[in-house]
Image (cartoon, coloured by chain):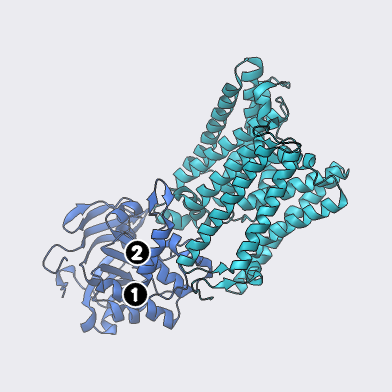
């Protein structure tokens, strides 16, 4: 057992070995990005980075909710179908019904909420495993999508609805060749990050916890700030700040807080860690399970809106296999297959790894078939690494 | 403090419970006072855990009366038990390995402000409680998976002190512990008594039982089979009551 002394500095090596799992994903992510940027000069170009954000935003939105479901010890196989269904409903309302864009968004969210209630009821109240309920949901909601759309595609949305996934905030502060507004937003984000890290560090010292040594801490902040600012300036050079990215950032921050700081999040971890203990301790297991599925349904509808806006229409086959991308993102990002372990930020990095892999291979002209093979192997290796790492931790206990 | 003479902290009268065809408890009487460690002993299947689980709100009796400080109550769930300031350490510990010490201590009863956790305050209280029990836990942020069996047991006992309980139920707290760890847990139990709590201790281990308890209640086949003053009773007498070599009529029970 390590003893803790106030303000003790911990070196790079300790930091890495202490948290192999987390740092492992980041290292893998950086390695993949580095590899593709060497292989293809366009990979890190402003246009392509913007593209990655737009192309994979919906998988990241789904992964946020999926992470919560997985930490709870459940799984949701229906999200791809829910994306299709909610997109279809929005299309019916906006394209066929000529309603304003926000009515379309709202009706999609309501449908997502109802889907979540439906699945939450069967899992939480009836006690059917989430795997079965959402497998049924996958078929059910796909079928409903075909019925809603009458077996045909609907397009185009155009206008504001189209802008949700394809719009940019730029030109607010002007700038020549580079959008000042985007840069300012990223600068605010960096300062916010630095302040929150500093406060966490202060808190840990106050409670006599181990922290990194000061130079290492500063180096970490500087590196993160540099990467983020570079990313921001690349976006600013292209088309500015994608609206989807703002939405995504808000969701990530909000759900990180929910999982790490709220009672609800704590109970999700407890149920996934030891269902029996949670029950005996007075955690309202049914209620938490129910609302986790409702939340997943709503997030799936958000992804449905973003996806239908991006494709500028609704197709009966939309969102096929999205659930697998979202689940893979969580497991690559360090979620445990048995529940109780996983972080929103981890799932995001896991999702980005998938995104970067797909995008990089696309740029290099690698075919769909090989892409699938590579993604499959990456998922398998990530979970194998997780299991190996856990065994090692148990052995040193 | 509720001293002798007043209504007992917990009083259970003529408690019965059936699981299908099995009669787990029939007409059992049981009493605990403040400042008292009462051991509940008996062979496997004698009904010890069933009785304890009624006190912790996990099970409800089919018949009989439960009174807390003289008032008749119905302990319908673990949260109700918590509200009545009854805390339980379950046999299977009921801890979450993936959470840290603080999170486990407050599990189900987190201090909150608008739905947000008050981590700072909870850690402070955790540290105080562990100090009170003279527990040796390296840090309140250590995940449970990194603790030894004895440390986990002391976390489980420390848990009971959250929410200012008056009655603590310990179900086999020393099972699967080493000698040193057992000694540590017994010290914890004595501290609970010194803090003025009533303690129900369920154990198979007669040495432990005789070391810490004030009174020993024997159950056999779901019925009372003797009540003994721990300091004045021999090991053999208790064993005889457990195995059924002696049968003690409820009328002959004499306490203190």
Task: Name which residue lies at 64% across and 61% down.
Answer: A220
What is the x, y in percent for residue B148? 50, 74
State whether residue A235 appears in this view. Answer: yes
Task: Name which residue lies at 67% across and 61% down.
Answer: A23
* Sequence-first disc among 2 and 1: 2
Report which quarter residue B38 is drawn in.
bottom left
Task: Name which residue lies at 62% across and 42% down.
Answer: A185
What is the x, y in percent for residue A39? 87, 51
Residue at image mark 2: B160
Which chain is mark 2 on? Answer: B
For label 2, the crowd category at 10 Å Cα-Cα, with few meaning under 14, some 14 to 19 and many 20 or more, is many
Asked if labels 1 and 2 touch by Cβ distance under 8 angstroms, the answer is no
The tint chain B carries is blue
Image position of A77 with respect to B229: above or below: above
The image quadrant where one finds the N terminus of chain B is: bottom left
Q: Work out which residue is located at the far left of the displayed protein and give it.
A: B5
State whether residue A333 appears in this view. Answer: no
Image position of B183 with respect to A221: above or below: below
Residue at image mark 1: B188
């Amino acid at each position: 057992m390590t003893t803790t002394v106030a303000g003790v500095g911990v070196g790079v090596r300790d930091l890495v070995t202490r948290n192999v799992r987390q740092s492992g994903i980041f290292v893998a992510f950086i390695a993949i990005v580095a590899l593709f940027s060497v292989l293809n000069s366009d990979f890190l170009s402003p246009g392509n980075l913007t593209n990655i954000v737009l192309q994979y935003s919906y998988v990241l939105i789904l992964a946020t909710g999926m992470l919560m479901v997985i930490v709870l010890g459940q799984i949701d196989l229906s999200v791809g179908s829910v994306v299709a269904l909610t997109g279809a409903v929005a299309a019916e309302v906006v394209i066929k019904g000529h309603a304003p864009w926000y009515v379309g968004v709202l009706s999609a969210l309501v449908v997502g909420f109802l889907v979540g209630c439906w699945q939450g009821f069967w899992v939480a109240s009836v006690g059917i495993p989430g795997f079965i309920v959402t497998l049924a949901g996958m078929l059910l909601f796909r079928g409903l999508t075909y019925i809603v759309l009458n077996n045909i595609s609907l397009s185009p949305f155009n206008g504001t609805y189209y802008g949700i996934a394809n719009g940019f905030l730029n030109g607010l502060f002007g700038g020549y060749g580079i959008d000042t507004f985007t840069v300012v937003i990223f600068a605010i984000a960096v300062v916010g990050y630095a302040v929150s890290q500093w406060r966490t560090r202060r808190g840990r010292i106050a409670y006599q916890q181990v922290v990194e040594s000061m130079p290492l801490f500063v180096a970490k902040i500087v590196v993160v700030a540099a990467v983020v600012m570079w990313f921001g300036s690349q976006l600013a050079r292209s088309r500015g700040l994608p609206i989807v990215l703002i939405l995504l950032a808000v969701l990530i921050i909000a759900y990180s807080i929910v999982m790490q700081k709220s009672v609800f999040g704590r109970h999700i971890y407890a149920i996934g860690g030891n269902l029996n203990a949670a029950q005996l301790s007075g955690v309202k297991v049914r209620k938490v399970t129910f609302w986790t599925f409702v939340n997943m349904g709503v997030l799936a509808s958000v992804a449905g809106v973003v996806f239908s806006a991006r494709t500028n229409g609704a197709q009966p086959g939309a969102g096929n296999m999205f659930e697998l991308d979202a689940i893979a993102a969580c497991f690559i990002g360090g979620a445990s297959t048995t529940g109780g372990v996983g972080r929103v930020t981890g799932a995001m990095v896991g999702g980005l790894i998938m995104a970067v892999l797909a995008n990089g291979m696309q740029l290099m002209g690698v075919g769909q078939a090989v892409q699938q093979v590579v993604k499959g192997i990456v998922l398998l290796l990530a979970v194998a690494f997780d299991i190996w790492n856990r065994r090692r931790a148990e052995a040193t206990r | 403090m509720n001293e002798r003479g007043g209504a007992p902290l917990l009083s259970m009268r003529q408690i019965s419970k059936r699981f299908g065809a099995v009669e787990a408890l029939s007409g059992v009487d049981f009493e605990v006072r403040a400042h008292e460690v009462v051991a509940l002993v008996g062979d496997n299947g004698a009904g010890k855990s069933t009785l304890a689980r009624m006190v912790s709100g996990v099970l409800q009796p089919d018949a009989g009366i439960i009174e807390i400080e003289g008032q008749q109550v119905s302990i319908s769930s673990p949260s109700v038990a918590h509200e009545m300031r009854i805390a339980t350490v379950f046999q299977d510990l009921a801890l979450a390995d993936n959470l840290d010490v603080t999170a486990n201590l407050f599990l189900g009863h987190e201090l909150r402000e608008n739905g947000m956790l008050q981590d700072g305050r909870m850690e402070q209280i955790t540290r105080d409680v562990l100090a009170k029990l003279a527990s040796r836990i390296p840090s309140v942020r250590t995940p449970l998976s990194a603790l030894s069996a004895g440390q986990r047991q002391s976390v489980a006992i420390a848990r009971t002190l959250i929410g200012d309980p008056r009655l603590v139920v310990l179900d086999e707290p020393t099972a699967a512990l080493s000698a040193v760890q057992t000694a540590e847990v017994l010290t914890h139990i004595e501290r609970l008594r010194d803090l003025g709590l009533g303690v129900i201790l369920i154990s198979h281990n007669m040495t432990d039982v005789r070391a810490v308890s004030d009174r020993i209640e024997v159950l056999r086949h779901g019925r009372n089979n003797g009540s003994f003053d721990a300091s004045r009773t021999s090991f053999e007498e208790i064993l005889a009551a457990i195995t059924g070599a002696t049968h003690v009529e409820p009328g002959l029970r004499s306490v203190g």
